[in-house]
Amino acid sequence: ITEFQGVSFLLADMATQVEAARALYLSAARLRDAGKPYGTQASMAKLFATDTAMRVTTDAVQVLGGAGYVQDFPAERYFREAKVMQIFEGTNQVQRVVIGRALTR
């Protein structure tokens, strides 16, 4: 199925979003390691990475069709785990509040 252009484009978008999420969390980690303020960047990284995880796992389940929703494939577990990541350690709505406050200081 990867030879279909629509699936290929979807996979390309998924890979790009994952790389962007990695770059964002590494940027926040570098600030922390350097002893600089990193709270806003960490909130941005958590927000973007968890929203990306949800989007990518939803797309993965879609690409796999019915097989993506059964326990035979790891996509099913990743899909469930992605949702909980949006909630723990401060919901994504809370992260948006943190980021918004930092931008309006």
Image (cartoon, helix red, strand yellow):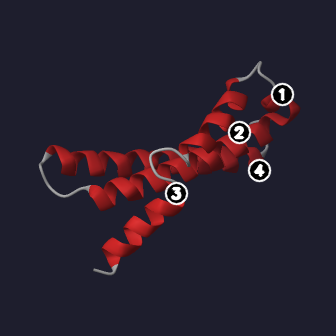
User: Residue 68: horizontal and vertical position, in percent?
Assistant: 79, 31
C-alpha separation, residue under disc 1 versus residue under disc 4? 19 Å
Q: Determine whether, in the image, residue 66 is placed left or right of residue 18.
A: right
Contact between labelled residues 4 and 3, with CB atoms less than 8 Å apart: no
- Please identify the residue farthest to the bottom as the structure is shown: 104
Residue for point 44% across, 68% down: 97
In the rendering, at what x and y percent does residue 50 appear? 53, 48
Q: As rendered, which of 66 and 86 lies closer to the eye?
A: 86
Q: Is residue 31 left or right of residue 4?
A: left
> Marks 3 and 1: CB-CB under 8 Å?
no
- Mark 4 — residue? 6
Res 3 visible: no
Closer to the chain start, of discs 1 and 4, is 4
Q: What residue appears at the point 60 percent right and 51 percent down from the top-left corner?
A: 13
Q: Nearer the viewer, mark 3 or mark 4?
A: 3
Question: What residue is disc 2 on?
Answer: 60
Q: Which residue is mark 1?
A: 67
Q: CA distance from mark 2 to mark 1?
A: 10 Å
Residue that carries the numbered disc 3 in the rendered image: 92
At numbered mark 1, what does the secondary structure look like: helix, strand or loop?
Answer: helix
Residues under labels 3 and 2: Cα distance?
A: 22 Å
Q: Earlier in the sequence, mark 3 or mark 4?
A: 4
Dot 4 or dot 2: first in sequence order is 4
The quarter of the displayed image where residue 33 is located: top left
Residue pictured at 66% horizontal, 41% vertical: 57
